[in-house]
Image (cartoon, rainbow, N blue to C red):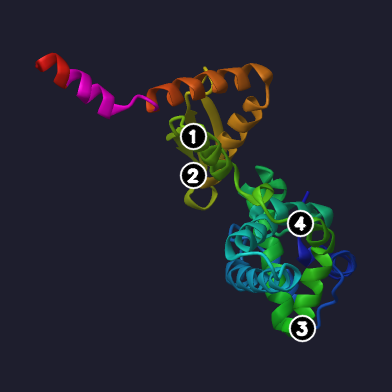
């Protein structure tokens, strides 16, 4: 169960501070950073906004310095990979952050302390809180310590492209029609919606269904499923047949057809 700071204030603050590597001068900032909008009191949405901006700047700067010969496209993809929700939620789980979140009764009951989007928002909120409690230099050092391993492993190139982009480029390169994505259902309240998306493509026989907390995330999840299926030998064979068919159709010379039709007319 998530902690409630009014009951475990000093103990929880001390424990979490050790995990994240920073002790707050004003512990109330940490409390606010951990407070979801479903709970009473000052919640963390404004801090999340601030932390999101700081994180983007810090990661952009370090990538700019770390990869001086790579273009804007590669840098953008690497930054997106590092600051995406999945990555931030992983960091949150590394800190067991869910145990410290302050949630409303409904969110607590529905397992909100494990929800990826809530963990992501809380991590960004802590970044914003650290900045307000100290300065940009201290905040930057803390962020880089959290991302040290990921920054050492990050590589430019196609590995950083999102699933939709990779699938699109894969199909375009083989002259195969692009996939079609449709929302088939949405559920939940505005701040906690679930989107269910269907993806239909020529390269696999069945439609793919995926879900996410936004339409974009659901579509990315669907594209990832299609890419996973394409790894199988059977589907690679089907892609090869489609590619051969498309190539054959595109090599028909319309000029020769017109000449033959002209001769027949004479």
Spatial CA span between label 3 and label 1: 42 Å
Answer whether labels 1 and 2 touch (C-beta < 8 Å): yes
Other residues around mark 3 within 10 Å, as few (<14) / some (14–19) / many (≥20): few
Q: What secondary structure is marked by label 2?
A: helix
Mark 3 or mark 1, earlier in chain:
3
| Region of the chain picked out in magenta, as a range | 251-261
| Camera-side mark, 4 or 3 | 4
Tag on residue 215? Answer: 2
* Residue carrying label 1: 197
The image quadrant where one finds the C terminus is: top left
Residue 210 visible: yes
Mark 2 or mark 4, earlier in chain:
4
Answer whether labels 2 and 3 touch (C-beta < 8 Å): no
Query: Observer-nearest residue: 237 or 189?
Result: 237
Residue 103 visible: no
Mark 4 or mark 3, earlier in chain:
3
Query: Observer-nearest residue: 51 or 27?
Result: 51
Mark 1 or mark 2, earlier in chain:
1
Tag on residue 154? Answer: 4
Other residues around mark 4 within 10 Å, as few (<14) / some (14–19) / many (≥20): some
Is residue 252 shown in magenta?
Answer: yes
Spatial CA span between label 4 and label 3: 23 Å
Spatial CA span between label 2 and label 3: 36 Å
Above or below for 12 versus 210: below
Answer whether labels 4 and 3 touch (C-beta < 8 Å): no
Q: Is residue 179 left or right of residue 143?
A: left
Residue beneath the point at 70% across and 58% down: 82
Query: Observer-nearest residue: 170 or 76?
Result: 170
Q: What secondary structure is marked by label 3?
A: helix
Spatial CA span between label 1 and label 4: 30 Å
Mark 1 or mark 4, earlier in chain:
4
Answer whether labels 2 and 4 touch (C-beta < 8 Å): no
């Amino acid at each position: 169960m998530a902690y409630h700071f009014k009951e475990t204030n000093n103990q929880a603050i001390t424990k979490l501070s050790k995990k994240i590597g920073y002790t707050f001068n004003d512990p109330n900032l940490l409390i606010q950073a951990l407070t979801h909008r479903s709970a009473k009191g000052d919640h963390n949405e404004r801090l999340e906004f601030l932390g999101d901006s700081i994180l983007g700047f810090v990661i952009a700067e370090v990538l700019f310095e770390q990869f001086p010969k790579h273009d804007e496209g590669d840098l953008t993809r690497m930054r997106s990979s590092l600051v995406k929700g999945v990555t931030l939620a992983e960091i949150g789980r590394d800190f067991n952050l869910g145990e410290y979140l302050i949630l409303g009764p409904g969110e607590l009951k529905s397992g909100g302390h494990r929800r990826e989007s809530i963990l992501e928002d809380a991590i960004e909120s802590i970044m914003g809180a650290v900045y307000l409690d100290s300065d940009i230099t201290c905040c930057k050092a803390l962020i880089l310590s959290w991302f040290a391993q990921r920054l050492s492993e990050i590589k430019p190139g196609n590995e950083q492209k999102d699933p939709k982009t990779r699938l699109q480029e894969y199909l375009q390169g083989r002259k195969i029609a692009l996939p079609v994505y449709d929302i088939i259902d949405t559920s939940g309240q505005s701040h906690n919606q679930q989107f269910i998306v269907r993806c239909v493509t020529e390269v696999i026989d069945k439609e793919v269904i995926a879900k996410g907390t936004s339409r974009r995330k659901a579509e990315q999840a669907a594209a990832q499923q299609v890419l996973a299926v394409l790894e199988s030998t059977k589907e690679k064979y089907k892609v090869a047949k489609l590619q051969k068919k498309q190539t054959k159709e595109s090599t028909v010379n319309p000029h020769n057809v017109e000449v033959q039709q002209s001769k027949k007319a004479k």
